[in-house]
Image (spheres, coloured by chain):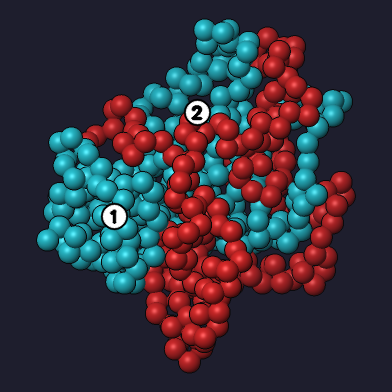
Chain colours: A red, B cyan
């Protein structure tokens, strides 16, 4: 497999990153980013061809594993048809995606608002809750603010500090009943 | 609550807090939050960005009867919905909240909301996860292989202060002392991380923890290889 890997490209990827890329949740100085070259299923390879079991799922997002062929094929197929549309228009893939999510959610759910990621999903969920009538009493919430943009990071109980520190509670944060 | 329940529009919480340490809610906790919301007319939002779409061995963590089983009013999601192949997230909206915006304008949106490449990848991902039994695999791996394996590691290695998790969503607390639960230093975490990488495992670390969070497709054989690597590295660190 080593023949498929270009270690010179890996070195250039690292050098370009350290020269020009500003990383999230990090003090920039001491970073030594890992440089993955390929992925397949539960494995990733670096540019020297060394294999790693990906027990991070990247940032705990890769539930279906790297490079699932059906997902890659679907992205390529849609790219050939139409790569982008305005949010106001209707699109068959958007409707199919929404109906599949609702089918799995079940219960009293009926619609999906799509965003670009998790932080803006939380931000818009908060906005919906502020604008909708109170469930039990009806009538608008007193804190309802037109155009409010509560930021997702502000809801976190601890501000990020230096180093690679995602919003997190203390190292020993736990439910009181958790077994030691 | 001292300022009055009407000053609170919503309670937002991760059904299973993830980056904070994979904290499985104790029995009754989420039911209690649901009851408070119902009593005071507060919208309940579950953040399922990390814990949704297979991570806990369920389509959604709130559907797991062993620690949840209550229904929220809104759900935020991202990550597992298409595994991040193209950036996407969203909000699952209850019928009653959706109906509040039948005649009222919802004042929010994004240019790339419902981007067709992201949407196509969601459709393919959810179909493949269903057809291939990927969520069921995550549940079975957690119950039969990964959970028992990590608990065995904790018996052997005093550096592991606690093991928590479900499905393919686990955390190990690394401690200097099990009784005080004093966390190991950042230098120790850094050394564990470097040794895991050298042994061929890409880890996820947060504070003094290792989060053991493989893809939902992980096989029992791959879990076995990973457990052997963790075992080897903890042995080296402890000596």
In the image, residue B224 sits, relative to residue B170, either above or below, namely below
Q: Residue at point 31% right, 47% down?
A: B208
Query: Which residue is painted at 24% across and 47% down in the image?
Result: B184
Q: Residues within 10 Å of mark 2 (few under 14, many from 20)?
A: some
The residue singled out by tag 2 in the image is B70
Q: How many marks?
A: 2
Residue B37's label in the rendered image is none
SS at circle 1: helix
Is label 2 or label 1 in front? 1
**Left or right relative to A131: residue B65:** left
x and y percentages locating residue A83 in the rendered image: 80, 64
Q: Quadrant of the N terminus of chain A?
A: bottom left
Q: What is the spatial separation of the Cα atoms under label 2 and label 1, in whole angstroms? A: 41 Å
Expressed as whole percent of the image width and height from the top left, the position of residue A46 reads 45, 77
Quarter where residue A127 is shown: top right
Residue marked by disc 1: B187
From the viewer's side, name the closer residue of B140 and A174: A174
Disc 1: host chain? B
Q: Looking at the picture, does residue A164 appear above or below residue A138?
A: below
Most foreground residue, B156 or A147: A147
Secondary element at tag 2:
loop
Q: Is residue A106 visible?
A: no
At horizontal 66% and vertical 17% (from top left) the residue drawn is A135
Q: Is residue B164 visible?
A: yes
Chain of residue at mark 2: B
Residue that appears at 48% across and 31% down: A157
Sequence order check, earlier mark of 2 and 1: 2
């Amino acid at each position: 497999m080593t023949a498929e890997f270009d270690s010179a490209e890996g070195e250039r990827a690292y050098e370009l990153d350290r020269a020009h890329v500003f990383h999230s949740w990090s003090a920039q100085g001491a970073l030594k980013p890992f440089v993955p070259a390929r992925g397949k299923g539960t494995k990733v390879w670096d540019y020297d061809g060394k294999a790693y079991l990906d027990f991070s799922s990247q940032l705990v997002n890769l539930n279906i594993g790297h490079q699932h062929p059906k997902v890659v094929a679907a992205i390529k197929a849609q790219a050939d048809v139409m790569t982008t549309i305005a949010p106001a228009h209707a699109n068959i893939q958007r409707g199919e995606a929404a109906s599949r999510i609702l089918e799995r959610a079940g219960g009293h759910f009926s619609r999906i608002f799509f965003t670009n990621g998790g932080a803006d999903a939380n931000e818009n969920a908060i906005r919906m809750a502020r604008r909708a009538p109170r469930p039990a009493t009806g009538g608008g919430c007193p804190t309802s603010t037109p155009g409010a943009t509560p930021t997702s990071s502000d809801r976190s109980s601890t501000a990020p500090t230096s180093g690679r520190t995602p919003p997190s509670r203390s190292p020993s944060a736990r439910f009181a009943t958790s077994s030691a | 609550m001292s300022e009055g329940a009407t000053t609170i529009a919503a309670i937002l919480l991760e059904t299973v807090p993830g980056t904070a340490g994979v904290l499985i809610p104790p029995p009754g906790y989420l039911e209690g939050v649901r009851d408070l919301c119902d009593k005071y007319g507060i919208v309940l939002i579950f953040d399922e960005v990390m814990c949704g779409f297979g991570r806990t061995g369920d389509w959604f963590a709130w559907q797991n009867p062993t620690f949840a089983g209550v229904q929220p009013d809104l759900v935020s999601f991202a990550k597992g919905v298409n595994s991040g192949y193209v950036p996407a997230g969203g909000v699952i909206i209850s019928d009653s909240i959706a109906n509040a915006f039948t005649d009222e304008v919802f004042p929010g949106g994004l240019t790339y909301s419902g981007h067709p490449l992201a949407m196509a990848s969601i459709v393919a991902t959810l179909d493949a996860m269903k057809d291939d039994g990927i969520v069921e695999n995550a549940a079975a791996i957690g119950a039969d292989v990964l959970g028992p394996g990590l608990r065995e590691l904790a018996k052997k290695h005093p550096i592991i202060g606690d093991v928590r998790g479900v499905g393919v969503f686990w955390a190990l607390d690394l401690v200097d002392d099990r009784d005080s639960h004093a966390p190991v230093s950042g230098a120790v975490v850094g050394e564990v991380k470097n040794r895991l990488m050298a042994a061929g495992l890409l880890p996820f670390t947060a504070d003094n923890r290792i989060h053991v969070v493989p893809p939902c497709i992980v096989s029992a054989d791959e879990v076995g290889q990973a457990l052997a690597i963790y075992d080897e590295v903890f042995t080296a660190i402890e000596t």
